[in-house]
Image: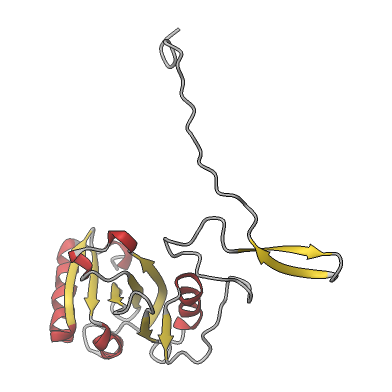
Amino acid sequence: MQSSSSSSPASARQLGDTLAAVLGAKVKNVQIALGEVTVTVAAADYLAAATLLRDAAGCQFEQLIDLCGVDYSEYKDGRYDGLRYCVVSHLLSVSLNQRVRLKVFCLDDDFPVIDSVNGIWNSANWFEREAFDLYGIVFEGHNDLRRILTDYGFIGHPFRKDFPTTGHVEMRYDPEQKRVIYQPVTIEPREITPRVIREDNYGGLQ
């Protein structure tokens, strides 16, 4: 049996045609690159498309093996409808030995919200919590959406491209209160100037 991780161009095209036929108007784009199929759907069609991908003949993607957020930031352009935040899922069909990448963009850059697929694939639970924690993407319908990697007192979402590398707060032990406290970060931003080598024969043969 051929490995699903290395589909031939012909099988990838066949899968792309199948997905386009099954999803119909819900498909915004089907892309095939390096033997992998990526399907982009609109936010309004996300749950319906996900259900079809799980149940429809020729799809049967029973397993969600990964889900993550993406921040396109200033790189957003016409290819992404000018939208910043995207949710990317990787689906596996054990029955048909095939994979697909599913993408959907959040409509609001200031408050990114998308439907939760945890009711379709329960493996999405912690993945969606991670995307919420790191990118601030809210998954509507998730019944336990809370941080999973950062601390409860953490401010912001550290995988957003505009998140400062120093963060917003720092922790220290306060001997008077005899406990760990949060305080505004005290690290001062520095501009690092690269060292300039002025030796004439630097890098040359001796």
Q: Where is 55 relative to 185, above or below?
A: below
Colour basis: secondary structure
- The residue at the point 57 percent across, 76 percent down is 148
The picture places residue 116, in percent across and down from the top left corner, at 40, 87
Image check: 111 left or right of 48? Answer: right
Residue 69, picture quadrant: bottom left
- The residue at the point 23 percent across, 58 percent down is 34
Q: Nearer the viewer, residue 158 or 128?
A: 158
The picture places residue 182, in percent across and down from the top left corner, at 69, 68
Q: Is residue 49 visible?
A: no
Q: Where is 175 relative to 104, above or below?
A: above
Q: Nearer the viewer, residue 21 or 9?
A: 21
Q: Nearer the viewer, residue 7 or 112?
A: 112
Q: Is residue 152 visible?
A: yes
Residue 178, picture quadrant: bottom right
Image check: 193 left or right of 59? Answer: right
- The residue at the point 60 percent across, 71 percent down is 154
Residue 84, picture quadrant: bottom left
Quadrant placement of the N terminus: bottom left
